[in-house]
Image: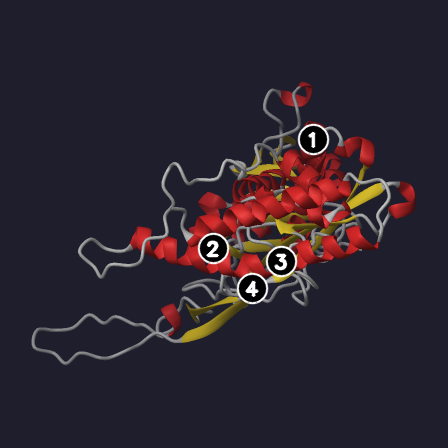
Amino acid sequence: MASRYQVLLQERADLVKEGEALDAVADWGDEQTTRANEIAERIKALDPEIASMEVIREAQRNAPAGGAAMPTMEPTAAEKPESLPTPFRTLGDQLAAVARAAQNPHATDPRLLTIQAATGASEGVASDGGFLVQTDFSADLLRLVHETGQLSRRCDHKPISAGANGLKINAVDETSRVDGSRSGGVLAYWTAEAGSLTKSKPTYRQMELTLQKLTGLYYATDELLMDVTALGAFAQDAFAEEFGFKVDDAIFRGGGAGMPLGILGHAGTVSVSKETGQAAATIVKENIESMYARAWARSLPNMEWFINQDCWPQLFKLSQVVGLGGVPVFIPPGGLSAAPFGSLLGRPVTPIEQCETVGTVGDIVLADFSQYLIIEKGSIEAASSIHVQFLTDETVFRFILRMDGQPKRNAALTPFKGGSGKTQSSFVTLATRA
């Protein structure tokens, strides 16, 4: 005898099939409209009960051996419905199913309902709410976002739980490396035999990150929807590229209000002054040396130079005077006949679009992005609508990525020994040369 859970699953599958049959009717009358509404209401009533039974089944599967027995709801092999399809094979396959559900809620692919619905005005109606991207596709999209981003893939990522909207960390409040200031106040003492010990303790600050939303709309023509392979490829390429770019831009210059807090102009970033008499829109050897001297020594192994491509001619001209002549400071591997990627003072040089044009603060940056913290919820959410671009025969997909980020330190470091005012940081910029 079939279990209650199996009966409900079968009823729901039958209702979906009936809705599909209704959708095939060319001209709907009052009778068909009434029945379609009844089907939608019944499915809406069934879903919570099915979901609660699935919770019980999951708890039963995870119950420890020897624990209290729970009523079994697991269907036998013979009871398992043949009408419940397997998960989607590709992202394009799922997006096409979402589009069909938006066009006709009664023909919703049952596979969509096995992925927790992100519902709006009415449950299971894609045009009102939508569906989450299948877990493996979501993870793949997020991976592509980080791979296309030059900066985000170098940052320290912390996933947060499904029930959280942010992260609070008690971070060590360290702004100086002088005695009595390390770790916010920890100090060790050389002590004589039988001598008294002197106490010290660290101080902390609260570092808080709150999830922000990065959103995008993707317009797909009906012709593209018919080719699920092309649809998935277009959606992956377009949004991985754009989301990766916008995340990088926020990491670099974000204002912190409704978006991550960037390194440019941040209190923990060191800005090196230009040389006396330095011409506008130039980079000289002394700039490079001064920036390197302000880098926090512990970050140097991870540091890289990030530049705007406008800086290349300036770097090629850098030279060190030796006697009556000079030697180049920057030469690409293989000389000028090779691709212009090399190193300055042993650290790699990488051009990125987010850097400012030459002569403006942010045109050349020495940075260790492992000292930048990002939080994110693993899934990229997607929903669709056929109504936004109805007249142009297009379906609109909405993608949402929830994340936040900021530098780990809130201030530049005063070194243990060093010149007055010569703070150090994991992020070093060069002031504007106007």
Query: Mark 3 or mark 1, which is nearer to you?
Result: 3
Dot 2: what SS? strand
Dot 4: what SS? loop
Q: Residue at x 59, y 67 (%)?
A: 267
Q: Is residue 352 visible?
A: no
Q: Which mark is residue 158?
A: 2
Q: Earlier in the sequence, mark 2 or mark 4?
A: 2
Marks 1 and 4, how far apart in space? 47 Å
Query: Mark 2 or mark 1, which is nearer to you?
Result: 1
Marks 3 and 1, how far apart in space? 31 Å
Tag 4 residue: 268
Q: Which mark is residue 42?
A: 3
Q: Nearer the viewer, residue 266 or 260?
A: 260
Crowd around label 3: few <14 · some 14–19 · many ≥20 (10 Å): some
Give the residue type at disc 3.
Answer: Arg
Give the residue type at disc 4.
Answer: Gly
The image shows residue 64 at horizontal and vertical percentages of 23, 55
Marks 2 and 1 close (CB-CB < 8 Å): no
Give the residue type at disc 2.
Answer: Lys
Q: Earlier in the sequence, mark 2 or mark 3?
A: 3
Marks 2 and 1, how far apart in space? 33 Å
Crowd around label 4: few <14 · some 14–19 · many ≥20 (10 Å): many
The image shows residue 76 at horizontal and vertical percentages of 36, 41
Q: Earlier in the sequence, mark 3 or mark 1?
A: 3
The image shows residue 41 at horizontal and vertical percentages of 66, 60
Q: Nearer the viewer, residue 350 or 112?
A: 112
Tag 1 residue: 228
Marks 2 and 4, how far apart in space? 21 Å
Q: Nearer the viewer, residue 422 or 70?
A: 70
